Image (cartoon, helix red, strand yellow):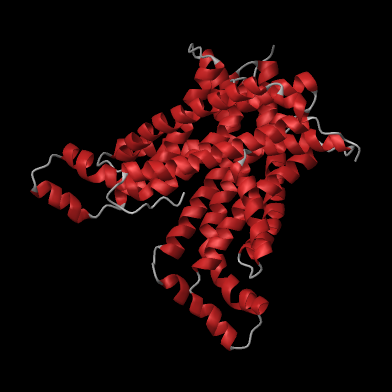
Amino acid sequence: MRHFTIDDFYYLLWALEWTVLLSLMAFVGGGLVGALLALFRISRWRALRIVATIYIQIAQGTPLLIQLFIWYFGLSLFGTKLSPFTAVGIAMTMYSSAFFAEIWRGSIEAIPKPQWEGAASLALTWLEQLRYVIVPQAIRLSLPSTVGFMVQVVKNTSLAAFVGFVELARAGQLVNNVTFEPLPVFGSVALLYFVVCFPLSVLSRRLERRFHGGGMQVISS
Amino acid sequence: MDYTFQFGEVFRHWPLLAQGALYTIVFSLVGMSCGLLVGILGAVARSSRYRTLRAIAGTYVELVRNTPLLVQLFLFFFALPSLGIRLTAEQAAMLALVFNNGAYSTEIVRAGIESIQRSQHEAAASLGLSPFQTFRYVTILQALERVYPALTSQFILLMMASSIVSGIGAEELTAFGNRIQSENFRSFEVYIVCAVIYLGLTFLMKLGFIGLAQILFPRRRALARA
């Protein structure tokens, strides 16, 4: 038995790096897959729309924890031994991509139809219309929600603790097991999460006020 | 790939799975109802004229929304006993879920309350309603009606988040799934079945909320797009 010292806090800080790394991975992976899914959702081909919708319904309709277990325990049965890191990466990518896809689809659909028609009348192809006219405007609309969801992503990485991956929450458990001083240990863990998440929350609110506060100015400016 | 699926091994444990689903529903119902109550109180505090109340409610919301539920569970389950408050895993889980959902509900309900036009307050005052009567008969029902879609999707997220309480040993669907797979090592099948049950619960909740909207808000067309 020993006390919670500054060295333990440094250990938590080290673990925070993994939390941030996992978050970035989920953001990049989820962002890429999510962008593709958003395109599928607004595609003119029905099959693509249906596939994307089913994927999103499943990814959003089941807990992330269960998805994580399926990837971690399940796939190893097929002879591929997944490291906790890979399993968490895949599960977080799948889960986040569904939410990003819906956020971005919403923003794309919020762009008034005349923008598409105007772009089409300039003889831009569908992809060019999207690339040069729609997406630049949609990104501004989606920015507050995207940053807001980043907070969820960071918090969701704590589930990696369930498969034994040592990130911040798991590190807290480990330190608590040797010190048995849960209040300072988990208090510090909560504080570290807060330090990462709070600025993102504030940024999200700022963007929200800046882009949506002006009402109709969003598109015209 | 030479793996043989044996879902039979999982379905043999169906009473346990059904019980787990029931516990998940109980956790969700408690989290929803008590969380909404906390949310209404929190929203009133956040739009109060007293600075201290606003600050307390604001701090609560920010602290909860910027830390993971898992860490909040650890704090309730491991840290509260060191302050002399001893809770079972289930009690700690319920408290944490209410505490967590309360903060999200606060923000949603507050948005609803703020969306009610001033003129309604003025009209209520001119009818001689007290501030409490205004809140009770004019503001809160309309506010809840306007934020109903946001509130219900938050509740569905809560139901799924309740799987995390297995992390402190509270019994619900995921915890029973863990137990079954540790007995028969059919982890893939077990978690697939759990996923399907959760998917079914999500679907049922969506349907339930649409139906509830018809009963709760009869005077408006169904705005349930949850």
Q: Nearer the viewer, residue A203 or B11?
A: B11
The image quadrant that residue B55 belongs to is top left
Q: Quadrant of the N terminus of chain A?
A: top right
**Residue beneath the point at 63% across and 51% down:** A56
Q: In this image, B80 relative to B8: left or right? A: left
Q: In this image, A165 relative to A133: left or right? A: right
Q: Is residue B20 above or below residue A211?
A: above
Q: Is residue A97 above or below residue A178?
A: below
The image quadrant that residue A127 belongs to is bottom right
**Residue beneath the point at 59% across and 70% down:** A135
Q: Nearer the viewer, residue B66 or A90?
A: A90
The x and y percentages for residue A131 are 64, 74
Q: How many marks?
A: 0
The image quadrant that residue B117 belongs to is bottom left
The x and y percentages for residue B201 are 55, 36
Q: In this image, B65 relative to A77: left or right? A: left
**Residue beneath the point at 82% across and 33% down:** B5
Residue B111 visible in image: yes
**Residue beneath the point at 43% across and 59% down:** A209
Q: Nearer the viewer, residue B94 or B221?
A: B221
Q: In this image, B171 relative to B186: left or right? A: left
